[in-house]
C-alpha cells in the first residue's frame, strides 16, 4: 500500500491540501468526488516527501492518510526519565545547559520522572555541584583524563553507551555547534529519532510523548514532531529560547560514576583552539542588524549601537548621515549607496527613514525603529516602533536582554 | 518578448545576466567613480568561458558568432556598460584576427583570447582621423623583416590593458588609403607606449588611452592579410562589430528602463505611486517600445551577419543608430522619471545617461551611419531604376 | 583523491512567502536550487581536485527532478553525478536519509573525503552529515571553515565554534560539513554547462545500493511530523510611547509572541 493516499469519498475538492504542499505535489485532477461535484485531490508520489502538511490541512475532512510502519524500535516500557547533555568546553559549562535543564524540569512536571545530566570529559567532576544546583536529580558521569574536550567521537561513543545503559525516555542537548554534531551521531548509533533546534517542548498528556516543535524552511514554518516507537526521544534545543532553570535552595541530587564504561581512543587529533569573538559579523549575512543614524548625535555614542549589536549577536549598520559624519566606516552603510540587507531583524536607532536608507533595508523580515520623533518616516515601514530617547531605550533594551527577560 | 533563442543561446544570455547581477552591478558605481579597470570581472568572464563565445572551435572557442557576442554585451551592459566594454572592445580587437588572420596568427593569439588570458584592442582613430578615417597618418615603414611604426592613435578602448592591438597604419603613405595595412602589435614590442588614461564623461570603468609608436619595431609576420588591405580589414571589422555597439546601447536602455519602472512603483506623490499617472505611463510605454525596437533591429543585424549575408552595412548601421539614439532618449527619460533622485549620484540612472552618450559617437558617429543608410538607399533605388 | 559531495535540491526558502489569508506557504515562483551550503561544499571539492588531483562525484537523494541540481553541479565543476532516487526513499527523516546516502557511498566504492553543507535550508537540521559518517564507520567534523592541508592521509581542518575555531586533524576517510566562510563559490562556466547538458546521470534505486528496505523512507524514520503551521508574523505598525521600561517591555513581548529571538548567540 502506498504510504500516503487520498480517501476519495471524504475529499470535497476544496484545494486546501494543494495550497499547503511545500513541494507542489498535489493537484485536483482526480475523479469527481461523492460529496460535491468537484475533482478530488491526487498526490504525485514521485514528488511527495511525506512531510504531512496536507494531512494537517485536511483536518476537517480527513481525506488524506499517511500509513507508517516504522522499523522496530526499543522496548519503550523500559525507558524512563529525562536526560540532558551537560555540554562543556575549556573549563566551562555551556551557557545552554541551564536552559536545557530548565526545559527538562518543565517536562518533569508532566512526566514525574528524574532529570539527569550526562557529563562526559576530563576533570568534569567540578561541574557536578553546578549541575545539581539547577535541580538535576542525578549526574551520570564519566570523568577520565583520556577524554579530550574536542574528542567528539569519543564523546558520542560514551554518551550512546550511557543512554543504552540508563535508558532515559528523553535526551536533550543544546542546539549549539557541538550539540548539533554530537547528538545526530549518537542517534545514528542508537537508531532513534532526533529533532533539531526545538523552540518548544511539551508532553502530550494523552500519549505521554514528547511534542517537539521547531522552525523549518528558514523559519517560515513551524513543525511539531513526535518520535513514537523509538527511545530515547532525542532533541536539540535552540540556544537562548528556553528559560534557564532556577537554582534550587537545597540541591538534593546525586552523582553516579559510570567509569566502568571503557573509553576508546579518539580518531581525532586536537591541535589548538583559537579564540575569536567575531565583532565584525558580515552585514549582508547577518540575521540581526542594529543601525545608527543622525540621532546618535556624537561619534562616541556609536559605542551604544555596537554594544547592542553584540548583545543581539548581530552586525552594526549605519545610515548615510552617520557615515558622512565620519562616525563609522562606509562598509557599515545600509542604503541606496551602501549595502542592501535582508536580515531577520533590523533595529534602526535614531534613523529618520529617508527613502535612500529604506532602499537598503526594507526587505528585512522585522523592522524595529527607535526614534524620538513620532512622525519620522521610519515608523511607516517599521513593524514595531518605540517613540523615545534612544539613549534611554537602548540601555533598557540591553539590560532586558542580558537578564534574559 | 520571445526572440526564439536556441538552448545554447539562452544559456549564454542567462550566464552573462548572472555575472552582471552578482559581480558587476555591486561594483558599478564604485568603478564609475574611481575609473579603475575591472580586472576581477574580466577574470570571472574568462573563467566562465564567455570570451570563447565568438571564437571558432578550432582555436578553443565555442564557435558562436556576433549574435552570441551581442547577447553577452547586452546583459553585461545592463549592469554597467563601462565594465562591459572591456569585453566588447576586446571582441572588436579580436575580429580582424578571426576574419583575416593566417593559420599561424590565429593559432598564436586566438586560444589565449578565448581563454580570456589576454585582452585585445582595435587601433584606427587618430587626432586628425575620426569619421575621416582615411586621413590617418601613422606609418609602418617596411624595414628588412619588420615594420617600424611611428605615430599616435587616439582614444583607444582597452589601451594600456590589452596585450594585443590591431593597428591600421600606412605601409605605403604615397598610395593613401590603398597604402594602409593592419598590423598586430603586442604590448611589449619596443617603441610602443601609452598616453595617459582619458578622464571621460561616461563609461568611466573602461580604459581609454593613446597608443604612442616611436620607431616601434614589429615583425612582418604580424601583418594581417596583405599590404594595402588595411582599410578593407578595418571596414569589414567594423561592419561585423557594429551590432555589438548596438547591443551595448540596448543593454544601457534596458537597465535604465528597469530602474525607471521600479522607481515609479515605489515613489508616492499625491497619495499614489507615480506609475498611476498617465504622464509617467506614456513615458514608460514609449521607452519600452523603443527598447524593444532596438532589440529587434540589433538581433536582426547580428543574425544577418552570422548567416553570411553579403550586404549587411545598412541593417548594421540602422541598428547602431536606432539603439544608440534610443539609449540617449531612454536614459534621459529615466532620469526625468526619477526626478531629483535621478539627478543624484546615489541613484544609478544619471550614470547610465552619461554612459549612453558615447554610443552615438564611437564606432562610426550616428551622422556617418545615417550617411551610410541614405547612400545605400539611393544606390539601391538607382539599381532598381536601372533594371526597369 | 576521491571526493564525494552530497547535495540536496531545496526550494529557495529565502524567497518563500506566506499567503496572509490562508496562512500557507506560497510556493508559486519559488525556484528549486542547490542547497546554498552544498554549493560551498562543491566548490571546496573542486578546489581539492585542482590541488590534489582525483575526482569529484556528486550525489543526491531525491525525487526525479533533483537531477537538475546534479546537472548544475557538473556545470560548477563536478566530474560526474548519481541520482539516488526511489519511491522507497520518500518520507525519510534524517536518520533514513543518512542511511540511504551511506549505502550509496559504499556502492560507489567509498571516498577519501565526503563533503556537504552544514545544513539544508529547508530542513535546517544539520543531522545528515554525522549520520552518514556513523553509518560508514568513519570520523566526521562539522562546521569546517578551512581545510588547511592534506598530507599522507592526514587532514588538518579548522572547525568554527561559537567563540572561535578549533584546529583538528583526522585520518582519511572523513565526512566534513562546511560553513560559508570556507570559500567563495565560482560561477558556472559555459563548457561546464554544456558538459552538464550532455552528462549521463545514472539513477541508483534502493535495490542498487544494497539497502535494507526497512531502514528506508517513511518506515525507516523514527521521527514523524505531526503538524505544520506558520508562525504568527508581526502584522506591523505597532508604535509604543511611554517610559523606556514599559515600551521596551512591550516590544520584547511582541517579538517573543512572534517567535523572534534577538539574543546573543
Image (spheres, coloured by chain):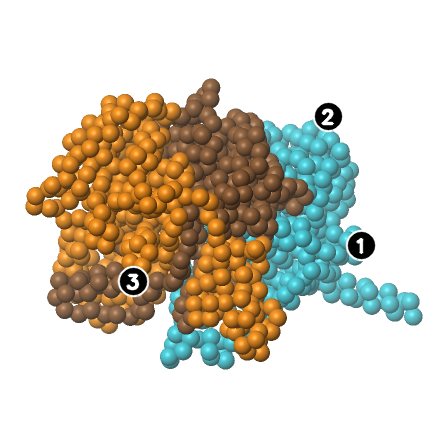
Chain colours: A orange, B cyan, C brown
Considering the numbered disc 2 on the image, is that residue within a helix, a strand or a loop? loop
Q: Is residue B278 left or right of residue B108?
A: left
- The CA span between labels 1 and 2 is 38 Å
SS category of the residue bearing label 3: loop
The chain ID associated with circle 3 is C
**Upstream in sequence: badge 1 or badge 2:** 2
Could you say where residue C248 lies in the image, as x and y percent from the top left? 18, 62
Number of other residues with Cα within 10 Å of mark 3, as a class: few under 14, some 14 to 19, many 20 or more: some
Q: Give yes or no for contact between labels 1 and 3 (Cβ–Cβ under 8 Å).
A: no
Residue furthest right as drawn? B388
Q: Label 3 near label 2: C-beta < 8 Å? A: no
Q: Residue A225: percent from the left, percent from the top? A: 38, 54
Residues under labels 2 and 3: Cα distance?
A: 84 Å
Q: Tell which subunit mark 1 falls on.
A: B
Q: Which mark is residue C258?
A: 3
Which secondary structure lies at badge 1? loop
Q: Residue at x 20, y 69 (%)?
A: C240
The Cα atoms of the two marked residues, 1 and 3, are separated by: 68 Å
Q: Quadrant location of residue A34?
A: bottom right
Tell me: A161 left or right of B132.
left
Q: Image height check: is A361 above or below C147?
A: below
The reply to whether residue B181 is in sight is: no
For mark 2, what is the residue?
B144
Q: Which residue is mark 1?
A: B310
Q: Residues within 10 Å of mark 2 (few under 14, many from 20)?
A: few
Q: Position of residue C74 (x, y in %)?
A: 59, 41
Residue B54 is labelled as none
| x 31%, y 37%: residue | A163
Label 2 chain ID? B
Where residue B303 sits, quadrant-wise, is bottom right
Amino acid at each position: 500500500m502506498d504510504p500516503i493516499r487520498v480517501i476519495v469519498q471524504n475529499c470535497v475538492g476544496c484545494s486546501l491540501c494543494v495550497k499547503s504542499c511545500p513541494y507542489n505535489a498535489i493537484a485536483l485532477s482526480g475523479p469527481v468526488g461523492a460529496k460535491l461535484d468537484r475533482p478530488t485531490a491526487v498526490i504525485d508520489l514521485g514528488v511527495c516527501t511525506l512531510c504531512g502538511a496536507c494531512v494537517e490541512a485536511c483536518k476537517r475532512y480527513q481525506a488524506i492518510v499517511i500509513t507508517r510502519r516504522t522499523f522496530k524500535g526499543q522496548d519503550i516500557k523500559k525507558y524512563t526519565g529525562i536526560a540532558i547533555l551537560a555540554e562543556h568546553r575549556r573549563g566551562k559549562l555551556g551557557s545552554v545547559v541551564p536552559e536545557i535543564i530548565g526545559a527538562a524540569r518543565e517536562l518533569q512536571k508532566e512526566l514525574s520522572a528524574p532529570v539527569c545530566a550526562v557529563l562526559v570529559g576530563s576533570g568534569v567532576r567540578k561541574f557536578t555541584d553546578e549541575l545539581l544546583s539547577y535541580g538535576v536529580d542525578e549526574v551520570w558521569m564519566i570523568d577520565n583524563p583520556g577524554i579530550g574536550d574536542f574528542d567528539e567521537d569519543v564523546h558520542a561513543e560514551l554518551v550512546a553507551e550511557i543512554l543504552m545503559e540508563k535508558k532515559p525516555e528523553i535526551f536533550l542537548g543544546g542546539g549549539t555547534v557541538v550539540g548539533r554534531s554530537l547528538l545526530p551521531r549518537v542517534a545514528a548509533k542508537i537508531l532513534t529519532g532526533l529533532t533539531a533546534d526545538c523552540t518548544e517542548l511539551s508532553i502530550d498528556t494523552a500519549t505521554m510523548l514528547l511534542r517537539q516543535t521547531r522552525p523549518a524552511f528558514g523559519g517560515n514554518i513551524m513543525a511539531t514532531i513526535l518520535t513514537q516507537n523509538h527511545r530515547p526521544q532525542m532533541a536539540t534545543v535552540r540556544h537562548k529560547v528556553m528559560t534557564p532553570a532556577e537554582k534550587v535552595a537545597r540541591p538534593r541530587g546525586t552523582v553516579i560514576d559510570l567509569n566502568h564504561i571503557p573509553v576508546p581512543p579518539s580518531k581525532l587529533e586536537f591541535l589548538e583552539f583559537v579564540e575569536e569573538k567575531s565583532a565584525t559579523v558580515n552585514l549582508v549575512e547577518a540575521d540581526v542588524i542594529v543601525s545608527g543614524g543622525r540621532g546618535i548625535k556624537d561619534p562616541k555614542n556609536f559605542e551604544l549601537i555596537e554594544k547592542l549589536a553584540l548583545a543581539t549577536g548581530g552586525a552594526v549598520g549605519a545610515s548615510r548621515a552617520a557615515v558622512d559624519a565620519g562616525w563609522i566606516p562606509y562598509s557599515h552603510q545600509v542604503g541606496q549607496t551602501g549595502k542592501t540587507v535582508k536580515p531577520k531583524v533590523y533595529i534602526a536607532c535614531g534613523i529618520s527613514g529617508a527613502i535612500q536608507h529604506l532602499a537598503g533595508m526594507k526587505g528585512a523580515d522585522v523592522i524595529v525603529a527607535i526614534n524620538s520623533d513620532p512622525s519620522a518616516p521610519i515608523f511607516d515601514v517599521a513593524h514595531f516602533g518605540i517613540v523615545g530617547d534612544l539613549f534611554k531605550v537602548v540601555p533598557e533594551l540591553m539590560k532586558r536582554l542580558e537578564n534574559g527577560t | 518578448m520571445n526572440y526564439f533563442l536556441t538552448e545554447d543561446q539562452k544559456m549564454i544570455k542567462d550566464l552573462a545576466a548572472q555575472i552582471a547581477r552578482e559581480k558587476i552591478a555591486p561594483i558599478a558605481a564604485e568603478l564609475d567613480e574611481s575609473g579603475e579597470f575591472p580586472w576581477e570581472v574580466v577574470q570571472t568572464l574568462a573563467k566562465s568561458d564567455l570570451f570563447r563565445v565568438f571564437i571558432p572551435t578550432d582555436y578553443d572557442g565555442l564557435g558562436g558568432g556576433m549574435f552570441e557576442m551581442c547577447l553577452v554585451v547586452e546583459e553585461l551592459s545592463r549592469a554597467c556598460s563601462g565594465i562591459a566594454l572591456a569585453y566588447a572592445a576586446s571582441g572588436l580587437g579580436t575580429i580582424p584576427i578571426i576574419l583575416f588572420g593566417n593559420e599561424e596568427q590565429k593559432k598564436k593569439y586566438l586560444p589565449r583570447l578565448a581563454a580570456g588570458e589576454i585582452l585585445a584592442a582595435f587601433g584606427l582613430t587618430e587626432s586628425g582621423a575620426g569619421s575621416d578615417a582615411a586621413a590617418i597618418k601613422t606609418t609602418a615603414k617596411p624595414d628588412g623583416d619588420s615594420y617600424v611604426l611611428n605615430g599616435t592613435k587616439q582614444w583607444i578602448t582597452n589601451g594600456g590593458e590589452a596585450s594585443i592591438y590591431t593597428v591600421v597604419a600606412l605601409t605605403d603613405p604615397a598610395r593613401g588609403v590603398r597604402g594602409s595595412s593592419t598590423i598586430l602589435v603586442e604590448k611589449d614590442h619596443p617603441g610602443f607606449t601609452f598616453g595617459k588614461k582619458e578622464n571621460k564623461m561616461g563609461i568611466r570603468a573602461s580604459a581609454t588611452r593613446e597608443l604612442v609608436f616611436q620607431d616601434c619595431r614589429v615583425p612582418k609576420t604580424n601583418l594581417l592579410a596583405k599590404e594595402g588591405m588595411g582599410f578593407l580589414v578595418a571596414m569589414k571589422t567594423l561592419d561585423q562589430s557594429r551590432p555589438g555597439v548596438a547591443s551595448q546601447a540596448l543593454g544601457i536602455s534596458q537597465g535604465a528602463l528597469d530602474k525607471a519602472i521600479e522607481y515609479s512603483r515605489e515613489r508616492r506623490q499625491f497619495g499614489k505611486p507615480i506609475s498611476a499617472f498617465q504622464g509617467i505611463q506614456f513615458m514608460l510605454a514609449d521607452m519600452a517600445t523603443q527598447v524593444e525596437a532596438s532589440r529587434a533591429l540589433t538581433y536582426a543585424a547580428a543574425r544577418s551577419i552570422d548567416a553570411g549575408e553579403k550586404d549587411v552595412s545598412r541593417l548594421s548601421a540602422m541598428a547602431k543608430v536606432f539603439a544608440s539614439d534610443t539609449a540617449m532618449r531612454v536614459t534621459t527619460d529615466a532620469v526625468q522619471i526619477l526626478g531629483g533622485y535621478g539627478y543624484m549620484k546615489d541613484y544609478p540612472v544619471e550614470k547610465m545617461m552619461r554612459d549612453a552618450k558615447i554610443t552615438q559617437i564611437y564606432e562610426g558617429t550616428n551622422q556617418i551611419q545615417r550617411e551610410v543608410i541614405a547612400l545605400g538607399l539611393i544606390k539601391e533605388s538607382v539599381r532598381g531604376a536601372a533594371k526597369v | 583523491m576521491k571526493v564525494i559531495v552530497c547535495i540536496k535540491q531545496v526550494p529557495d526558502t529565502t524567497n518563500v512567502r506566506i499567503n496572509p489569508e490562508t496562512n500557507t506557504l506560497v510556493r508559486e515562483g519559488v525556484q528549486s536550487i542547490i542547497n546554498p551550503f552544498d554549493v560551498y561544499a562543491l566548490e571546496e571539492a573542486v578546489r581539492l581536485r585542482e590541488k590534489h588531483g582525483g575526482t569529484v562525484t556528486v550525489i543526491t537523494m531525491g525525487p526525479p527532478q533533483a537531477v537538475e541540481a546534479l546537472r548544475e553541479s557538473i556545470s560548477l565543476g563536478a566530474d560526474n553525478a548519481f541520482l539516488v532516487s526511489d519511491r522507497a526513499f520518500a518520507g525519510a527523516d534524517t536518520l533514513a536519509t543518512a542511511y540511504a546516502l551511506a549505502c550509496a557511498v559504499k556502492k560507489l566504492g567509498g571516498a577519501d573525503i565526503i563533503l556537504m553543507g552544514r545544513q539544508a535550508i529547508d530542513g535546517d537540521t544539520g543531522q545528515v552529515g554525522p549520520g552518514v559518517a556513523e553509518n560508514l564507520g568513519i570520523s566526521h567534523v562539522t562546521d569546517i571553515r578551512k581545510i588547511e592541508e592534506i598530507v599522507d592521509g592526514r587532514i588538518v581542518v579548522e572547525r568554527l565554534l561559537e567563540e572561535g575555531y578549533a584546529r583538528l586533524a583526522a585520518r582519511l576517510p572523513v565526512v566534513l560539513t562546511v560553513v560559508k566562510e570556507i570559500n567563495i563559490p565560482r560561477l558556472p562556466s559555459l563548457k561546464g554547462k554544456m558538459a552538464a547538458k550532455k552528462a549521463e546521470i545514472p539513477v541508483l534505486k534502493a535495490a542498487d545500493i544494497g539497502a535494507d528496505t526497512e531502514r528506508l523512507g517513511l518506515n525507516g524514520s523514527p521521527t514523524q511530523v505531526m503538524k505544520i503551521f506558520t508562525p504568527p508574523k508581526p502584522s506591523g505598525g505597532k508604535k509604543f510611547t511611554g517610559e523606556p521600561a514599559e515600551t521596551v517591555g512591550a516590544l520584547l513581548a511582541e517579538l517573543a509572541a512572534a517567535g523572534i529571538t534577538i539574543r546573543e548567540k
